[in-house]
Amino acid sequence: MIRVVLPAHLRTIAHVNGEVTLDVEGPSAPVKQGPATRTGASATTTINRKDFGLSYNRAIEAGPVVGDEVKITIDIEATRRSS
């Protein structure tokens, strides 16, 4: 498993674009399943929603509904069929 940091462009949250850094883990070792070979990877980042213009917050008795930091996780799996 390889771990790299990848710059990325997050497009249009509330009409605001921004740069993020993805922490990528993978690809996983290929796994043979029947006629196919599978591999996968995962990427995570944390954004501050206020950086994207999302500053509203509706308070309830227990506290704020949404925190300022939002964690984004992307999981991907690729399959190649044997010929």
Image (cartoon, rainbow, N blue to C red):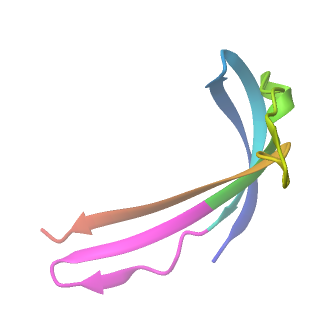
Q: Is residue 20 left or right of residue 15?
A: right
Q: Is residue 82 left or right of residue 58?
A: left
Q: Is residue 9 left or right of residue 80?
A: right
| Residue furthest out toward the top | 15
Question: Is residue 28 covered in magenta?
Answer: yes
Residue occupying image coordinates x 22% and y 75%:
36
At which x and y percent is residue 39?
A: 42, 72
Name the residue nearer the viewer: 20 or 81.
Answer: 20
Where residue 52 sits, quadrant-wise, is top right
At which x and y percent is residue 59?
A: 83, 39
Q: In which quarter of the image is the C terminus?
A: bottom left
At which x and y percent is residue 69?
A: 83, 47
Q: In this view, does 32 lie above or below 26?
A: below
Residue stretch in magenta? 26-42
| Residue furthest out toward the left | 83
Q: Quadrant of the N terminus?
A: bottom right
Q: In this view, does 24 lie above or below 66?
A: below
Q: Is residue 81 above or below residue 68?
A: below
Where residue 50 sits, quadrant-wise, is top right
Question: Is residue 29 covered in magenta?
Answer: yes
Residue occupying image coordinates x 66% and y 20%:
14
